[in-house]
Amino acid sequence: MSVSRRNMILGTAAAGLATIRPASAEIQCQPYQPGVNFCRVGVPTIRVDAARPPDQQCRMWCWAACIEAIFRINGHRVRQSRIVEKVFGSPDICEPADGAQIAYAVNGAWTSDDGESFYAEAQTLLDLRMGVWIPNAGAAVAQILAQGEPLINGAVGHATVLTGMEYLADIYGNGQILALIVRDPWNPGGSGAVRRLLQPNEAYGTFLITRVLVQ
C-alpha cells in the first residue's frame, strides 16, 4: 500500500476527532494555538500496569499476547496457548494470525484459567486487507479509549495493544493524530509487554484496529 494511501486513511480517521468533547476524565484537552486543541486520551496507566500485560510466548504470537493482555486488563487470565489452540487446533503452533483469525480467536464464551466464565466479542474498526474501514475510525478509537478499553493495533506485520492517543483538533472538525501509545508484547527479556510510542512508519503502516468487548 502506498504512503499516500496510508496518509489518507489516517487523515480521514483523524478528521472526526474534534467532535469529541472532554466529558470523560480520560480525555484531556488544552489550547495548542488559536482554534486548535491538543488532546490526550487513554486507558489509565495504573490499570494497565496492574494487569501486567504479558510478553509473547513465541515470535509469531504477538496477536495472541494482545488478546491475553486485553482479557487480563478486564480481569480474566487466559494463557496464550489456549488462544492459539482455538484458532489452529493445537497450542504448539507458532504462527501469525490475520484480522479474521484474531476476531475468531476473541469471539465467544470463555472460561478463564481460574475457572471464571466470561464472554468476548471482537469489533473490527479497520482491516485494510479485508476492505473494512469505518469513516470515523480515529474518533471511534478516541471514544473507546476514553471508556477505558484498549484495542488491538496491527501495523507493519506486528500487533500491539493500543492504550493511548495524542492528537490535535480544531473547531472545524479537522484533526491530526500525533502519537499512538501501545504495549508491545515483543520483549525478548521476558518481563512483560513494553510501553512505547509507535514510530511514524508503524503508525502509517496501521492496517488493523480491533476492539475487544469483554462481558
Image (tube, helix red, strand yellow):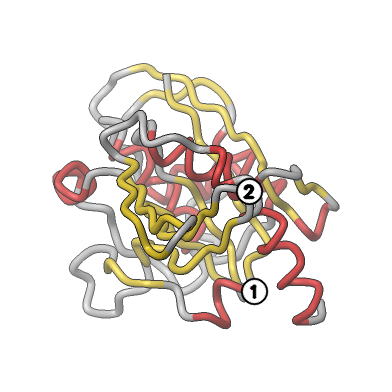
In this picture, is 44 found above or below 116? below
Q: Residue at x 41, y 41 (%)?
A: 145
Q: Distance between the residues labelled 2 and 1?
A: 27 Å
- Which residue is label 1 attached to? 205
User: Nearer the N terminus, badge 2 or badge 1?
Assistant: 2
Front in this rendered view, residue 81 or 61: 61
What residue type is disc 2 on?
A: Tyr
Quadrant hosting residue 136: top right
**Residue 128 position (above or below residue 205):** above
Determine whether the residue tagged by mark 2 lies in a helix, strand or loop.
Answer: loop
Label 1's element?
loop
Query: Which residue is at the front of the view, 109 or 127?
Result: 127
The three-letter code of the residue at mark 1 reads Gly
Residue at the extreme front of the image, as rendered: 34
* Residue furthest right as drawn: 131
> 10 Å neighbourhood of mark 1: few (<14), some, or many (≥20)?
many
Instruction: Answer left or right for 28 relative to 157.
Output: left
Q: Is residue 85 above or below residue 199?
A: above
Vertically, is 164 above or below 191?
above
Q: In which quarter of the image is the C terminus?
A: top left
At a point 34% along the width and 35% down the height, the residue shown is 148
Q: Where residue 170 sits in the image (x, y, percent)? A: 54, 54
Label 2, on which residue? 172
Quarter of the figure that contains the N terminus? bottom right
Position of residue 199 measured from the top left corner of the image (x, y, whole percent): 47, 80
| Residue 89 visible in image | no
Q: Which residue is drawn at 50% across and 36% down?
A: 212
